Image: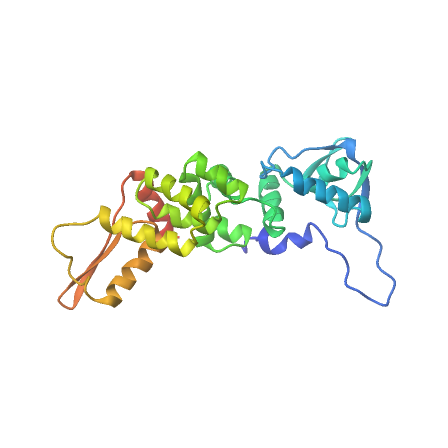
Amino acid sequence: MTRKVLGKGLSSLIPGPPPPSLAAPPPTPYVEIDLDRIDPNPSQPREHFGEESLEELAASIVQHGVVQPVLVRRRAERYQLVAGERRLRAAQRAGLRRIPAVIREVADEQMLEVALVENIQRQELDPIDEANAYRTLIEQRGLSHADLAERVGKERSTVSNSLRILSLSDSIQSQIRQGVITAGHARALLSLPDTKLREATARRIVGDGLSVRQVEKLATRASVRKGKVSGPPAGTNDPNTRHAEERLMHALGTRVRIVREAEGGRVEISFHSEEELQRLFEQIIG
């Protein structure tokens, strides 16, 4: 049986505007629903709604109306929001009494999944909300990273890297939410070997404007220093081997050594906890 991938088929749930045509437009599939008859989605993946962006959307709605309908499901005499909470909140601020909506039957276990994909496609989730939603789906549905990636229309490595951000400290996560530290910076910070160094480097990102590439270089040097052993490891004088080690360290977020022995050799991947071992296992096997 072919699995339905919501990330690639959301348009079947939320139709977009029809293409331009000289012919008369088909009847609209939307209905107008009173705002006070719509209850919130208990599985809403978005936790943070910026005041400024909500005000901007509300102002746009005053001028142009709600361009894209929300998605709801029936609940007795009322409706429950499935996707579109930001539009719903902005419509309330704009003083609207009704909002265009698409009504679909969505199972309870699909509520978070559909809302997550809709937010991802609109790029309305900050990296922390997106990672939290991935983690909730994995816990609720027992999905692997590969299964989840297929369902939301993302690469497995994208999902794995997103989830890793949740291992950063609360203060760094807060800065990611605020947009002062990017998701790229966050992935580079994860390559640093300890929390104290990550915090110090995060302060430099904000204060000195370090680029992602600069943080990656700091992480590589720090990982090599922490894992240093007596005597130079075999093969490290080869620039191709060193380059391969650096790329593997950036990809896996931990120290990697390539040790050459005669015509063969081995690759050593360091981990510092059972949790990190599990993360590496998931990341490598997908």
Camera-side residue of 173 and 67: 173
Residue beneath the point at 11% across and 54% down: 231
Q: Is residue 275 left or right of residue 13?
A: left
Q: Is residue 149 left or right of residue 237?
A: right
Task: Give the image location of residue 80, x and y in percent.
Answer: 70, 35
Let me know if residue 262 appears in the view: yes
Q: Is residue 263 left or right of residue 98?
A: left
Q: Is residue 227 left or right of residue 146?
A: left
Let me know if residue 146 appears in the view: no
Residue beneath the point at 13% across and 67% down: 262
The residue lying furthest to the right in this view is 24
In this view, 123 is above or below 236: above
Task: Give the image location of residue 23, x and y in percent.
Answer: 86, 66
Name the image quarter holding the N terminus: bottom right
Residue beneath the point at 12% across and 50% down: 230
Camera-side residue of 162 and 32: 162
Residue 21, by quadrant, is bottom right
Task: Give the image location of residue 77, x and y in percent.
Answer: 78, 31
Q: How is the image coloured?
A: rainbow
Task: Give the image location of residue 203, x and y in percent.
Answer: 41, 41
Residue beneath the point at 62% across and 43% down: 115
Camera-side residue of 94 and 10: 94
Camera-side residue of 126 and 203: 203
Residue 34, by quadrant, is top right
- Circle count: 0
